[in-house]
Image: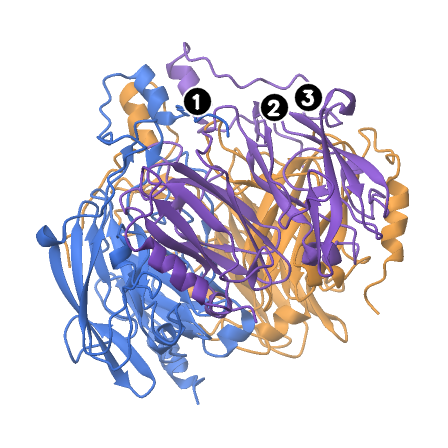
Chain colours: A orange, B purple, C blue
Amino acid sequence: MQPRKLTIPLFSLAVALTLVAGALVWSLPTTAQTGREPKAQACDASTAEQEDLYAEQINKNRIGYGLESGNATVPGPTIEMTEGDCLAVTLHNNTNQKLSLHTHGVDYTVASDGTPLNSSCVRGGKSRTYVWQAHSKSIRDDGSIEPGSAGYWHYHDHCRGSEHGTGGVYKGLFGALIVRASDDPVPDVEPCVLVMIGTTFGLKRAPNTPLCEANLGQRAEFVVIAHGDLFHTFHLHGHRWADTRSGSLASASDPSRVIDNKTSGPADSFGFQVIAGERVGPGAWMYHCHVQNHSDLGMSGIFLVRNADGSMPEGAQEALDKFEGHHHSH
Amino acid sequence: MQPRKLTIPLFSLAVALTLVAGALVWSLPTTAQTGREPKAQACDASTAEQEDLYAEQINKNRIGYGLESGNATVPGPTIEMTEGDCLAVTLHNNTNQKLSLHTHGVDYTVASDGTPLNSSCVRGGKSRTYVWQAHSKSIRDDGSIEPGSAGYWHYHDHCRGSEHGTGGVYKGLFGALIVRASDDPVPDVEPCVLVMIGTTFGLKRAPNTPLCEANLGQRAEFVVIAHGDLFHTFHLHGHRWADTRSGSLASASDPSRVIDNKTSGPADSFGFQVIAGERVGPGAWMYHCHVQNHSDLGMSGIFLVRNADGSMPEGAQEALDKFEGHHHSH
Amino acid sequence: MQPRKLTIPLFSLAVALTLVAGALVWSLPTTAQTGREPKAQACDASTAEQEDLYAEQINKNRIGYGLESGNATVPGPTIEMTEGDCLAVTLHNNTNQKLSLHTHGVDYTVASDGTPLNSSCVRGGKSRTYVWQAHSKSIRDDGSIEPGSAGYWHYHDHCRGSEHGTGGVYKGLFGALIVRASDDPVPDVEPCVLVMIGTTFGLKRAPNTPLCEANLGQRAEFVVIAHGDLFHTFHLHGHRWADTRSGSLASASDPSRVIDNKTSGPADSFGFQVIAGERVGPGAWMYHCHVQNHSDLGMSGIFLVRNADGSMPEGAQEALDKFEGHHHSH
């Protein structure tokens, strides 16, 4: 084994700019601990923000998470955190089979892993608290960057039906987790969460897929999650995004890909914000999986961009009516 | 809903450099309109560059687009735009079923969406003009970056056989759209457009797949598009590219992935330029889908890098002859 | 054809910084040759570092590569290079069918392509030397960046069973190739190489998949490769990485995606380093393909993060025992 090299990346922008502009104050904290003795635990549950989540049967074929008992949905409620937050989510399992809460992206110890492997499932009728931490970006002692927790993540069951939660996921036990950096822009409207599973969005086919809405010029936000066994390509008409952490270009020199179609496999997630109708105007814009037989089976929906004053743009009602008439799920 | 935060990204390169070097003039225009009142329409068709496109039956199983009547091909003609261009493409449907022109990446209103949903198909024997705008990058009033239209995009039918154009796409109604920023390098040879659909490139199997060609040292360009229902991995022997918007690294500090194999699902597209034979020399270099049964079924072809003077390199003719002898399509 | 434009990217960081800070010395060499006359050959085999590789039958269903005769493994040995290296690998085919060594990422001429097309297979009982070059990043005469060879690559057979080596790959003829830039950090422990093929990791299912191990705070390295016909999503619990060339963010302003789940198709490869247990603590952390039926079929394993002193963390032995009890391969 070669000795460990403590390295400062040669072309590091931070370093280069520091050289030319000592006056620039970078707000990145350096971690107090060394790389070899990292903070070994996520945050302290006793001082965390508390949240209750209820896992419940919705109907014969659906189980969902909800913020109140009797209010479970598919997908579950969108949970938002900001870097720096510590969140203790108490999951109440109001079903009669074990299930759990496993999350992506944020920090958690094995006790909050939500897996049979780490004995962190919840039996029917019981509760368990899962602790999640969202940390901000920092520079490690060796000069490398520890990414922050900000991202478009998601949570799901990892215990029901199989040790990977296959039975729970296919019943509807999934939802979005959005973690924002303190300086991330926030959208003007509620995030539109689209979960691609089987040949559905959120276990629904057109015309029952989510209607995403914004007025012309509003900052709208999409969170796209894939689950299950199939691969998908998410496509949005008339709008594009950057294939970055935030979905936006970070600067004029950001070379990242700008796309309107993205391959996603099970448990991938991404998100982005668009200015609704920017340069293309209002209307009923399609979103759909671009796998042809998936879209033909009803894996499509509408992003309705209303006029700036909230009124219905010309032709949009006709498009919505046409969409309503396309029944795929029979 | 939280109030909207007008934010200037903390680590924005543009901002940082502006601080240290006020003398630097960034050519990014700021948009005149605010984020809430974006330019609501794509460009003006009456002053646009005009183009005619003909959709025609090629044979019993193929329909293609062509720039002249009687000249349809699969894939259709590669359309090139530069940021700032406005293009009005009049599609003449010389078949007897409705079809359309739907494009990715550029700006268009719902009238140019090319979908049944937005009543923008063309019936057999009729024509319709689709207006596309390619805009350059700018900084929005809130400090965020609006990406430019530059990219390796594509167009296709969205009306024939299904409301998603499945029947048209599988017959051959697709082609590449390249949008360049004004300072993007242009290739020395015609772009090689490779469309992965079914287990074919452009509905053809080896040895009938496209022969991409360049002389040693020339800047060659590949545009790779996926369509249909399957997922693919495009691999090119002896050459690599960056997983960025342009396929190149933007600077010495660009951390982007450098790859020679890329997963692509239906309607994904990407492109890149390589210096033919750079550090590896001339010869018959394979490109192929790296899904083993796809390549074994004939989803492979050749990038022929000739000597710098255009002559055939040693062994290349033998390789071409060998490739010709591999008949997969019977 | 438009004339070739020799262009200096407008927003190039290198250029901008050069303007504001002439004192900064960039270590990028400019290539002596012009874009039109690139160095046409990989490095000189006679002065290269020499390596022997043996392809051998392991059992009835497995063929592997090994550094010594009698020592073949699946995956084959991890080969490491540093940019600037020239490596001559002599492959000894100790089987009775032709096979080869085809590599991704580094430079090689058609003579080292390892394909039937370029007549570079090795018949049973014979040997052949393949020459690979790893070059560092440079700026071409036209101002564009030639990426260096650094990356998480892989090698495999391209001759056995089909002209694409399908028979060899499915028997086990694959391995990782890691190329480091001179200033890339090196891991504290051996890289953990995980090859997703069929519904296995390295042709094995749980509980026989690789056990990746590190102590809390050590810099661990993962190399993930996909092969065969299926698409996968690699997921690691409790840890994340950046979707960049190195798997790390290059600077505080790097906008790249931070992920814990990645779609990979056949011949895709990526890698990353994590600080074991950073902010999450030690324990038995799962890695698995997140395609639900793949994980349920046994496509999962464990990243064991021990305590900083190498001792077993609380609950980890219990988790390992539980994992051992899950027999999928029967």
Q: Residues within 10 Å of mark 3 (few under 14, many from 20)?
A: few
Q: Which residue is mark 2?
A: B140
C280 on left or right of B293: left
In the image, which is nearer the foreground, mark 3 or mark 1? Answer: 1
- Say whether disc 3 or disc 2 marks the residue closer to the N-terminus: 3
In the image, which is nearer the foreground, mark 2 or mark 1? Answer: 1
Can you say whether A269 is above or below C4 in the image? below
Q: Is residue A211 visible?
A: no
Indicate the quadrant containing the C terminus of chain C: top left, top right, bottom left or bottom right: bottom left
Q: Amino acid at mark 1?
A: Leu
Residue C10: mark = 1
Residue B34: mark = 3
Can you say whether C146 is above or below B124 in the image? above
Mark 3–mark 2 Cα distance, whole angstroms, equals 7 Å
B94 on left or right of C41: right
Mark 2–mark 1 Cα distance, whole angstroms, equals 19 Å
Q: Secondary structure at mark 2?
A: loop
Q: Position of residue C71 (x, y in %)?
A: 18, 78
Q: Amino acid at mark 3?
A: Thr
The chain that hosts pointer 3 is B
Q: Position of residue B193 (x, y in %)?
A: 54, 46
Mark 3–mark 1 Cα distance, whole angstroms, equals 26 Å
Residue B83 picture quarter: top right
Q: Secondary structure at mark 1?
A: loop
Q: Amino acid at mark 2?
A: Arg
Q: In the image shown, does A322 or B108 lie closer to the viewer? A: B108
